Image (cartoon, grey):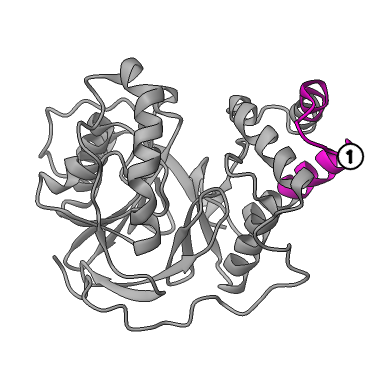
Amino acid sequence: MFARALQLVTLASLVTSGLACVSHSSTPMTGRVEVPLSERRIGQYISSGWSFDTSSFWIEGPEGVVVIDVQFLPSVAAEVIAAAERVTRKKVVAAIVLHANPDKFNGTATFQARGIEVWTAEQVLARIPEVFAKRTEAFVERYAPDWPTTVPQPRSFGAATTTLKLAGLELKAHVLGPGCSPAHVVIQWEDHVFVGDLVANKAHAWLEIGEPEAWLQRLAEIEAMQPKHVHPGRGRSGGPELVADQREYLQTVLSLVAAEKPTLPPDPAAVLRVRAALERRYEGYRFPVFLEIGLPAVWRRMASGSATEAAPEGPPEVPGEEQSAGPGPTSQP
């Protein structure tokens, strides 16, 4: 299994083993790198807790490297580029942002300054200015000067599911609806899917928009892609069991909130009871702080009965029939 084949490696060991070049040797590493023994074309960079243990992945193609998600801090985005290029001995030529949260898009300008085009769906791009303004207000004082000074601006590949031809690879970009963000891109390559925060491995869910029912639909859509390998936004890669675990977690959230018979405004004591129950059930999961924002949002959504989408009764067909998306990345940038 892919998850069992992961090996935690240091960049120093990769250099000495001849698997990496020595460019970017001056770039310090604050995170860690994992490379699967069974599939060396894929690598994972995991940031430190200072930037929320955020994962970026890369896929090595014949003509370069494609990075999935560009990190929370510009300095860490530079580390991702350096790590990918050291390991593969190829240049990063493109990157893809999976959804509109700053741990996915804040590093955009760092990539672009190196001549690397950064792509996302039109729906995700449209959300970035609002989300960036909100997160800047919350975080800039803590992280400055290691924070973007302007709104990140990836390029849009369009609003429809399409195939991106980058670095000699064909990557199917599924454009999906709300889950942990109002819109998502899931990248499918061979039997791998890169899903961002729609799946977390041993971490609490980012429930800010309060739509676990719609999120369950996204998980069913991912399962319909029939992946063998799932690469999450947090935690180590694994198999389809990661999607099943995420479904069970979201269903537990819904059950616990429903048991409190939610009304508006949210009852702080009841929300704390739900949080305590989740932390007991998922002992050891990272970032319980995410629940401070997420559980009241779910409570309000359930109390108002205004979920965007109903939870699915069974797996649907693979979403987003591929369409022509107009001008977009059809070859190596």
Tell me where residue 131 appears, x and y as whole percent.
40, 40
Number of residues whose C-alpha sits closer than 10 Å to that of mark 1, classed few (under 14), some (14–19) or many (20 or more): few
Q: Main secondary structure of the magenta part?
A: helix
Image quadrant where one finds the C terminus: bottom left
Give the magenta range: 249-274
- Determine the image quadrant of residue 269: top right
- Return the residue found at the far top: 142
Q: Which residue is mark 1?
A: 261
Q: Residue at x 60, y 24 (%)?
A: 289
**Is residue 29 among what the camera can see?**
yes
In the displayed structure, 215 sits above or below 290; it is below
Question: Does 162 lie within the magenta span?
Answer: no
**Is residue 45 among what the camera can see?**
no
Nearest the viewer among 36 and 122 is: 122
Question: Does 262 lie within the magenta span?
Answer: yes
Q: Residue at x 21, y 20 (%)?
A: 145
Q: Amino acid at mark 1?
A: Lys
Tell me where residue 200 appears, x and y as whole percent.
57, 44
In the displayed structure, 61 sits above or below 150; it is below
Nearest the viewer among 72 and 35 is: 72
Tell me where residue 36 appears, x and y as whole percent.
42, 51
In the picture, measured across the screen, residue 165 lies left or right of residue 305, that is left
In the picture, measured across the screen, residue 36 lies left or right of residue 247, that is left
At mark 1, the secondary structure is loop
Nearest the viewer among 293 and 114 is: 293
